[in-house]
Amino acid sequence: MRHLIDPMDFTDKETLMVLDLADRIAANPSQYSHVAEGKKLATLFYEPSTRTRLSFESAMLSLGGTTLGFSGADQSSATKGETVADTARVVSCYADIIAMRHPKEGAPLRASMFSRVPVINAGDGGHNHPTQTLIDLMTIRQRKNRLDHLTIGFCGDLKFGRTVHSLVNSLVRYPDNQFYFISPEELRIPDYLIEDTLKPTATPYQEVTSLEDTLPKLDVLYMTRVQKERFFNEEDYIRLKGIYTLTADKLQLASNNMPVLHPLPRVDEISIDVDMDKRAAYFDQVQNGVYVRMALIMALLGLTDPQTGKEVALC
């Protein structure tokens, strides 16, 4: 039995296999509408979510399966003191696969140690968001036709941005990628990402503060919001929340084929006048989220791909 807790849980080959399957699903989603009949997905979301929870539920329903779960800690037995381990033990009696989001780092890993069924980390604190990483990789590959030899800029909240941390960990596995980290000092990438990921892989990177100066150098721009829920001091949040805003005018500084990604939700870091630009890829990411999660559910459950007639098997 396999789980997906960290982007590095899958090998390069396994990651590409899931992305290839997601591409096949995207090309013909109706062909996959019955592959998970009789299977149940439990969504255990201990903190608020719209896109991720509904995307998981849409993915399972699109495969012909069913869903159950809760969308807030106050709706679970956590209010009675039940541990994550016991919740995993109990829910794995009801479902075939679990997707868990939790505000505490390591909670999905803890759940996976006690679950009888595969567990997918749907985001744990400011740590990891591996399914979003797969979505980002799929979207980048669609737009750039490759995952290597890219200059990627990450802008905004790089300290608490779990989507950034996960994606950097994955992109360093592909040759000749380099990064620009665009943020104020208070929201710079954490030291562990530099020491544990960038330096050991000798990945070129620069920490900068100007979005406008960096845009012409990029193949891909990944915007993030400043996350109010991660701040202990509201004054700091108010001071930093509007520090970067991508507008249609600023976007003219970038190349004509530089996609703009964002994990959403956005606040004011991308102006709505960018939405109509062909480079805006963030709503494509949303759609890709369903296909990626369909592929991931199939892979972890070993379901049969109707296009190949074979079970989807991780190595």
Image (spheres, rainbow, N blue to C red):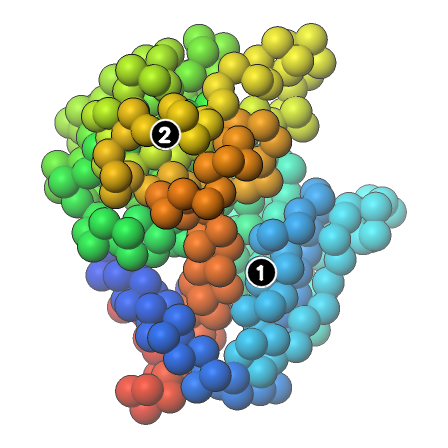
Residue 252 quadrant: top left
Residue drawn at the location 24% of the way across and 25% of the way down: 216
Tag 1–tag 2 contact (CB < 8 Å):
no
Expressed as whole percent of the image width and height from the top left, the position of residue 233 reads 69, 12
Q: Element under label 1?
A: helix
Expressed as whole percent of the image width and height from the top left, the position of residue 272 reads 55, 36
> For the view shown, which residue lies furthest in the right direction?
80
Q: Taking 19 as reference, is 230 left or right? A: right
Residue drawn at the location 35% of the way across and 53% of the way down: 139
Above or below, 117 against 194 in this view is below
Above or below, 203 against 285 in this view is above
Q: Nearer the viewer, mark 1 or mark 2?
A: 2
Tell me the crowding category of disc 2: few under 14, some 14 to 19, or many 20 or more residues within 10 angstroms, Cα based. Answer: some
Residue 302 quadrant: bottom left
Q: Name the residue carrying label 1.
A: 55
Q: Amino acid at mark 1?
A: Ser
Q: Taking 303 as reference, is 240 left or right? A: right
Q: Name the residue carrying label 2.
A: 251
Nearer to me, 219 or 104: 219
Q: Which mark is residue 123?
A: none
Q: Amino acid at mark 2?
A: Leu
